[in-house]
Image (tube, rainbow, N blue to C red):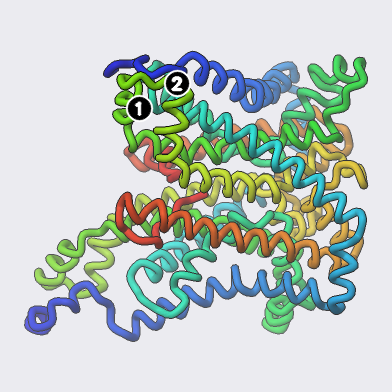
Amino acid sequence: MSAVAAATPRRATTDPLAVRVLLTGTALFFVALFIVLPLVTIFAGAFAKGAGVFWEAVRDPETLFSVRLTLLVTITVVAANLVFGLAAAWSITRFRFPGRRLLSSLIELPLSISPVVAGLVFILLLGDAGVWGRFLSAHGIKVIFALPGIILATLFVTLPYVARELIPLMEAGGSQEEEAALTLGARGWQIFRRVTLPNISWGLLYGVVLASARALGEFGAVSVVSGHVRGETTTVPLQVEILYNEYHFAAAFAVASLLSLLALFTVGIKKWLQCRAKGGLAGRGCTAGMAT
Amino acid sequence: MKRAGALPGFGLTLGFTLLYLGLIVVIPLATLFTGTASFSFGDLQAALLSPRVLAAFRLSFGASLAAALVTAVFGFLLAWVLVRYRFPGRSAVDALVDLPFALPTAVGGIALTALWSDNGWLGRLAATAGFKVAFTPLGVVVALVFIGFPFVVRMVQPVLQDLDPAIEEAAASLGADRLQTFGRVILPQAAPAIASGAVLAFARALGEYGTVVFISGNMPLRTETVPFLILARLEQYDYAGATAVAVLMLLLAASLLLAVNALQGRGGAAGSAHQ
């Protein structure tokens, strides 16, 4: 045994061919079952009744309305959380203050809260029976079962994404370059734009992509606060649900297939950005992913 | 404390961060607990001890646990294959692992339902084998595995990548066969990452709504999960009942995560290992 191992030292860390084939086969079978087949189901379902039905579903006025609404929500939410992410990362990584770690974990908190609970808290706070809801409704402001509620719930759910990409990146980069710029007479905004931003741009883009994907597809939290007012608060995922529950399966899958294309695009961009970001940093190639 | 405050913008950025976090996360979440504080013991008992609520908790915790175990095994296997072996399409498979994160949950939900229902491609196969998946607790587990396995893959991959091959060579040269090396050298080093990934998958599974609603069928006492129960109570304007269930779920999940963290010895290994 040991003689063989000594004669072919590489054998020590490689598995026999049969094991490799068996394990790879099992893993690929799992991927086929849980990723490939669901994807194929979506696209097959979308075209099950022909391209005509597909186009009709995609160009349906209610669907187009939901697309506009979702875009509006996504752009608003991602822009707000981008500003938040930059502010949070700047304060947490460039200064030392008590409670810094607590603040970092608070930022990650929404990731471990059920989307349904995320919707529920805004109903409790701002709904008709809620703490501030009576005040709002007395002044004729509608938040819950309306656009502001959808935006708030989506803000909650996507809040961590940009910040948690930027914080480790800026922590690792250190602040020497910025301090050098400061001693050379640059002012705050100049330092940020000329020194910080170029260093974090890929991580920033990565965070924005992740936040956008989540905002576009958020279902649970939005479902709770939207009240399903047709033609008023139906985002694209809610439109998919409505079509599906009304047995318009081909139409539901047609709209779902568009969301799936976006998801595939997101996954591709994510991979590409990771390769870019990692290539210079650790040189460990592109396979090490990050949990979302 | 080196030159704290040398750079400008401390007050502005920290102030904005605290204000934003307070308005969007802290105050809304606090409402949940101030709301429950006013309940009497009788209220809570009525809201939480009905058979329907208990059944939902049993299903949510049971299915999430089952899914976390499946996820630990197959997530590790997938990470191993992606890191150690070379095969055509490896890079594409690696990218596709993120799909459950990127795909809107409702889309994943209807896809799995169509696939596993009685006239779906896999549902038909399952039916001939004599079991049902869609609209049963098994369907809930399938949905939770879908949403959970990427957590394990992404936690384990970097650990496997950083394993020092010299240690494996040393084990082999000391006479260990491949299986022994795996069980005594590789697995112990990967175990914390597997556990952390499975804990994340479990936490995500407990609260999951979109992927599960379609495939579960939401039959009270049988296939109704806790998140759906919260929503069902909200739709009946039973805000107090919904809040009580939500708080109980949060407390149970939090204490479970804390217990796992404590068990892992080095606290924070699971909690802060999101990266």
User: On the rendered image, what quadrant is the N terminus of chain A found in?
Assistant: bottom left
Q: Which mark is residue A189?
A: none
Q: Type of residue at label 2? A: Gly
Q: Mark 1 falls within which chain?
A: A
**B84 lies above or below B198:** below
The disc, 1 or 2, on the residue closer to the chain's N-terminal end is 1
Q: Type of residue at label 1? A: Glu
The residue shown at (58%, 54%) is: B101
Instruction: Give the tally of numbered discs.
Output: 2
Measure the C-alpha gap from mark 1 to mark 2. 9 Å
| Residue A156 can be seen in this image | yes
Residue B185: x and y in percent read 23, 61
Residue B250: x and y in percent read 61, 34
Q: Nearer the viewer, residue B228 or B44?
A: B228
To which residue does mark 2 refer? A188
**Badge 1 and badge 2 both on one subunit:** yes
> How many C-alpha atoms fall within 10 Å of the one at disc 2: few (<14), some, or many (≥20)?
some
Q: Is residue A256 left or right of residue A210?
A: right
The residue shown at (55%, 37%) is: A160
Q: Nearer the viewer, residue B102 or B130?
A: B102
The residue shown at (10%, 71%) is: B173
To which residue does mark 1 refer? A178
> How many C-alpha atoms fall within 10 Å of the one at disc 1: few (<14), some, or many (≥20)?
many
Residue B97: x and y in percent read 52, 63
